[in-house]
Image (spheres, rainbow, N blue to C red):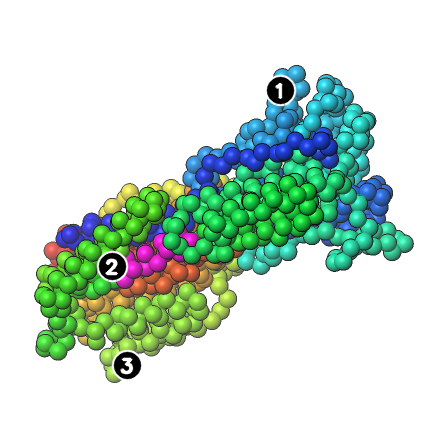
Amino acid sequence: MLDSTRSFVLFQLLLLFAVVLIYLRSTYPGSLEPQEVEHLKEPPPADRLVVLVRDGLSAQSFLANRCTNVPLLRELFLHQGLVGISRPETITYHSISPYISLFSGFNEDAASVARGWLGTPASIDSIFDRCKRSFAWTTTELISRFPKIERPRELSFETYGEGVTKSCSEMEDFVCRSVQRFLGGGSRLLLNTTGVIFFIHMTGVEPSCESLQRIQENVWNVYKSFEKTFPDQRTAYLFTSNLGDPQTKSEYSLAVESPFFLWGSGVNHIKSMPGRSFMANEAGLRLPLHVLNTPHLTALMSALLGVPPPVYSRGMLPKGMLNASLRYEANAMLINAKQLLAQARRLRELHPKRMPAFWLSFQMMDNFVKESLALKKQRRFRALLDYSCNYMPVLIKGMDYFKDYYRHVSITAVSFAGIAWIYCLRCHLTVGKKCRNLIEIQEVISSKRLVYARGFHRLLTGVLVIIMMLERIPLVVQAILLIPSLYWRTTLKILGERPKMVCRKSLMSTALLALICFGGFFRRYILAVGYLGFASYNNREAFKRRGHQFYLWLLLLLGLTVVSALPESLGCSQPGALMFSIFLTVLRPLACGVYLNLLTWLSNIPVLLAALEYILIGWHPWIMYLVSWIYLGFLVLWQRRNLQASEVFFFDLSTLYTLTCTSYESVVIQMLAMELQLALRMKLKRNESIGPKTAAHYILVYSWYSLFIIGSFPAFDDFLDILHETCFGYSPLTYGLVMVLKLILPWLLVLCIMAGNYKSLASYEQQIFVRLLLMNSAMSLVLLHGITNVGPWRDILSRFAEFAVVHVFPLVWLLLWRLTQLKVGSKWMSQLPNELL
């Protein structure tokens, strides 16, 4: 089954594809119906709701200086309404996520946002779908996510005008004037309509004390305009913030507090209660400060309007905030609990019936409904209110448990498949020359045990398939759970061919180097010490025959080890260090006595001079960007014969890598390449050969050290922030390619040096590839369990990137190796006498 390189590639990519499916798989419960609202004799607390959202407004700014920055609003909340802070339950991953949390009641996770990037984001059930009429003054992007917002012809729907592109304050004034024009038109037709919501989006950044005065004046004017248009005192108002922009840095705190002020019809006014409070005026009056999660505001808005909450809402209606009868509040709380119960029940139905119930079985759900209806029938509304309120947190915990259940099981399945794949790769490692006696060869298991193993594998696979079909497990999950069966079947088939596997002792050095490289993902100095030991051990004969090359090599080796103790250069902006890198790129071939033809100098010197001009002056940056991309295309397409092809390619790659730098990274990478060049040349002088095992070790250590000596995967986020300072510039269409070049160019440089010095390595391609697969698969198997789908974007993307890049590194190496053979190890060169090379 694994008889070609293509089959190895497919098996390696299958595991990566399975992991991507695990984390991108939707965890939504599917199609749900909204709860039915019982028609009571008393009307809902409010007929209409006005939601004003000001971008970037923090609770600290709103409540600062005893609320002196908002005197008009202070006069309102001193006598009516509720003031509090809202916190996001999770980190926001998209600029629209706070609005989805506010109007739909659930928090978009990273996987949902990623699926939106891959395709058109789906519409979301929201409070706009539950209301009879809905109007909004907001951006087109938000309208596309809430398509049920009404836009009738007789009532013109207004969004930001195309001519309004000035300051945020002018944009905010424009929105408020648009609302007032709307209210002055045909809006009186809505006077007798219930269940109406108005969403007014006031864009902007974190306001100063001066601009905060303007904001509260606009809110006050909108409030007075609504009161004048609808004088029936049946309008409720909510003023809040968008909870901030999506966070990418690791120092993000979940305690991002945004203010909310809820007042008007149906809103209770609580003057004192235990818990947090704030200073409301200069006299020292303290009012309660209510702390809610954003989805709780969704449930509160639904209860005010008397509509069922959105079907995917995780919000829980807070007690005591409605100015309504006990019966109405208890009924609203029950509807909220039944809506959460519907989600929990659906999620439970999508999972195996025999799995642990996590405090929540179908019987418990049915008992809750029966007991609630009994309390309602007995008119014990206080008990119904408390019972529903206390039961909702249990439902939320159960929903979280069910959503993550398949993910944990799937990761376990991929781990078992990874173990089988590692053992399968070990079976493909051929016995080296040093393993001559039978003690060093690991004998395969006996035929009898192999038959038992195959029978157990088939039995276990059959039982698993039957259980999955009976439990109606989703097809995607079934496919992932069957992956271990495929890999173990392949492994058992190879064992049946009785291969001569390498002994455990022969694998010790491979395992040790993989462990050292893995340690570099946590502490850079671990890989630095491992690099020092590896390079010294493999060139230990040079210590006996010391010469000027040896001392130069040793100086480079020690210097490169010390560099790892310095702060990361990746993502730092240091123009002076970058200029030094350019000079080093030009002077290195001259100092090493390398002869380069005129075409090579003419294709590199103008590019480097343009880079100097870009750093020092930068009159026309677009010229530098154009030159860089033309140079990249020239290296990719141009193929020329040269007796010093490796040196020419070394020079070209050094120039190209310098164009992607913002600090001294190019200096470090060229030092690393020079150290490897000297080490291999000293080996050649001693007529020492390199086998496939040693070559794979060189590739692994030098490739990963080329990354960790300058930075780490999280540092690529900082590099992206200053990508516009590179000679390639920043473009939404090309920034990904520049990031890839930054990562793989040092790898290509390492392979260029190895292929230029040991041309016989081309015949060991398959063996090197299999050993690299073995080492990197073992590393990625451990990194798999560090992947997370919660936390800042920086952590999520960097952890997944670590796993994915390590996992596909052998495949990238294969592509780069064949490119190197094309550029450096051409067939015509291998036919020349060694004296000419």
Query: Measured along the vertical axis of the image, is residue 690 above or below residue 338?
Result: below
| Badge 2 amino acid | Trp
Q: In this orientation, which residue lies closer to the viewer: 28 or 591?
A: 28
User: Which mark is nearer the camera, 1 or 2?
Assistant: 1
Residue 347 placement (x, y as % from top left)? 45, 46
Residue in the image at 21% along x and 76% along y? 505
Query: Measured along the vertical axis of the image, is residue 732 above or below residue 496?
Result: above
> In the image, which residues are magenta?
405-419
Residue that sits furthest to the top in the current view: 154
Residue 154 placement (x, y as % from top left)? 66, 16
| Residue placed under numbered mark 2 in the picture | 421
Q: Residues within 10 Å of mark 1 (few under 14, many from 20)?
A: few
How many badges with numbers are in the image?
3
Query: Measured along the vertical axis of the image, is residue 533 above or below residue 458?
Result: below
Please, what secondary structure does the residue beneath circle 1 have?
loop
Q: CA distance from mark 3 to mark 2?
A: 40 Å
Residue 788 placement (x, y as % from top left)? 45, 56
| Residue placed under numbered mark 1 in the picture | 152
Question: Image quarter for residue 106?
Answer: top right
Query: Measured along the vertical axis of the image, is residue 127 above or below residue 9?
Result: above
Which of disc 1 and disc 3 is earlier in sequence? 1
Please, what secondary structure does the residue beneath circle 3 have?
helix
Residue 406 placement (x, y as % from top left)? 39, 52
Is residue 108 at least partly visible in the picture?
no
| Badge 3 amino acid | Phe
| Residue placed under numbered mark 3 in the picture | 543
Q: In this orientation, which residue lies closer to the viewer: 459 or 691?
A: 459
